């Protein structure tokens, strides 16, 4: 064989082996590179800001301890809504690939919930303190004048619930300033006279599936200085509707709370008609 041909074949064999090595190297390098890239993405992926959720939930708990649900319920609901939105956003982001998650919206919602909860707590404390220190004598406590046949629907402490609800509503309305009795121009007297409940909807077995509950009171607005009656309502009511639940006591309690809120709203509207 001619020496030149031999050298050519040798060179060609070498180039073929070299190409196989490069292909093998590329085949091995691709998964290694992929693992490396995914490792980098995983290590640099944003961790869920759990602390912000814990902070907002703690703030809401503190607001509840300050009785925000009683004194500033709307502020508390706003905080709870923002917190739930933050939790929902957290769940949504967790369903995404780790390196594709963005918790910025969740952080913002959790921060909003925390701020609203703190404001609800501070507002509740302020309202509660003002009620305890300066409302004595401003509004006579509702008197229980229920007949024996009305006791079935009575919730313990209903008189104070109505009194406090009217006070809060007057403060929210702002038309009439609630003040001490000696400085007041008028005095509102309220008697709880009856609780009425009637069937509103019925099931196929003629059983009641929905009730309407009424709280009836007697109102008298008096001139604080002269003691004269300005106006009187002998049968004034507030009410609500509720469905029968498996736990009757829970349904009744919630209905009573809603009826008290409605009654307070109606009473204040009646009082401010003259101003």
Image (cartoon, rainbow, N blue to C red):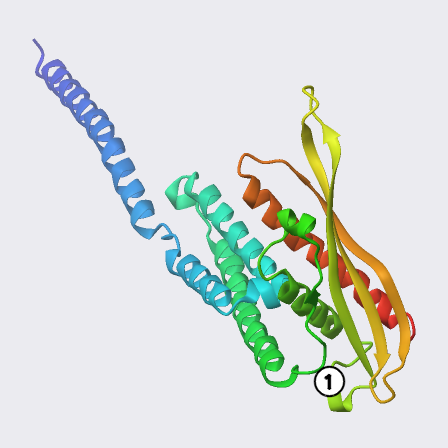
Q: Residue at x 43, y 57 (%)?
A: 53
Q: Residue furthest top?
A: 1
- Residue 216 in sight: yes
Query: Could you tell me which residue is drawn at 74 percent across and 31 percent down?
Result: 201
Which quadrant would residue 127 be assigned to in this image? Answer: bottom right
- Between 63 and 227, the residue placed more toward the observer is 227
Considering the numbered disc 1 on the image, is that residue within a helix, a strand or a loop? loop
Taking depth in this image into account, of 98 and 149 the one nearest to the observer is: 149
Dividing the picture into quadrants, the one containing residue 163 is bottom right
Q: What percent of the width, then of the height, locates residue 208?
A: 69, 30
- Tell whether 206 sits left or right of 60: right
Q: Position of residue 99 (x, y in %)?
A: 39, 45
Q: Nearer the viewer, residue 175 or 240?
A: 240
Residues 27 and 174: in front is 174
Check the image and report above or below for 165 versus 49. Answer: below
Q: Quadrant of the C terminus?
A: bottom right
Which image quarter holds the N terminus?
A: top left
| Left or right: 117 in relation to 240 | left
Task: Give the crowd class for mark 1: few <14, some 14-19, many >=20 residues within 10 Å.
Answer: some
Left or right: 53 as drawn, with respect to 150: left
Q: Which residue is mark 1?
A: 179
In this view, which residue lies farthest toward the front? Answer: 148
The location of residue 104, given as percent across then percent down, is 49, 56
Q: Position of residue 223 (x, y in %)?
A: 86, 83
């Amino acid at each position: 064989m001619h020496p030149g041909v031999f050298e050519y074949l040798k060179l060609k064999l070498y180039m073929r082996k070299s190409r196989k090595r490069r292909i093998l190297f590329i085949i091995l390098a691709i998964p290694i590179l992929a693992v490396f890239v995914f490792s980098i993405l995983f290590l640099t992926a944003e961790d869920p800001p759990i602390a912000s959720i814990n902070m907002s939930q703690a703030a809401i708990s503190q607001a509840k301890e300050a009785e925000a649900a009683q004194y500033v319920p709307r502020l508390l609901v706003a905080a709870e809504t923002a917190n739930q939105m933050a939790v929902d956003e957290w769940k949504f982001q967790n369903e995404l690939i780790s390196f594709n998650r963005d918790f910025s919206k969740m952080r913002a919602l959790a921060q909003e919930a925390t701020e609203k909860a703190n404001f609800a707590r501070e507002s509740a404390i302020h309202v509660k303190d003002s009620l305890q220190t300066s409302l004595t004598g401003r509004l006579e406590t509702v008197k229980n004048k229920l007949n024996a046949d009305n006791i079935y629907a009575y919730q313990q402490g209903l008189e104070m619930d109505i009194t406090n609800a009217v006070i809060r509503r007057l403060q929210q309305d702002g038309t009439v300033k609630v003040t001490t009795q000696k400085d007041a121009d008028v005095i509102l007297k309220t008697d709880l006279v009856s609780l009425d409940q009637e069937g509103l909807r019925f099931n196929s077995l003629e059983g009641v599936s929905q009730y309407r509950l009424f709280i009836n009171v007697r109102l008298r607005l008096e001139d604080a200085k002269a003691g004269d009656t300005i106006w009187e309502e002998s049968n004034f009511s507030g009410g609500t509707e509720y469905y029968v639940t498996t736990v009757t006591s829970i349904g009744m309690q919630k209905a009573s709370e809603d009826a008290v809120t409605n009654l307070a709203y109606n009473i204040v509207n009646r009082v401010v008609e003259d101003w």
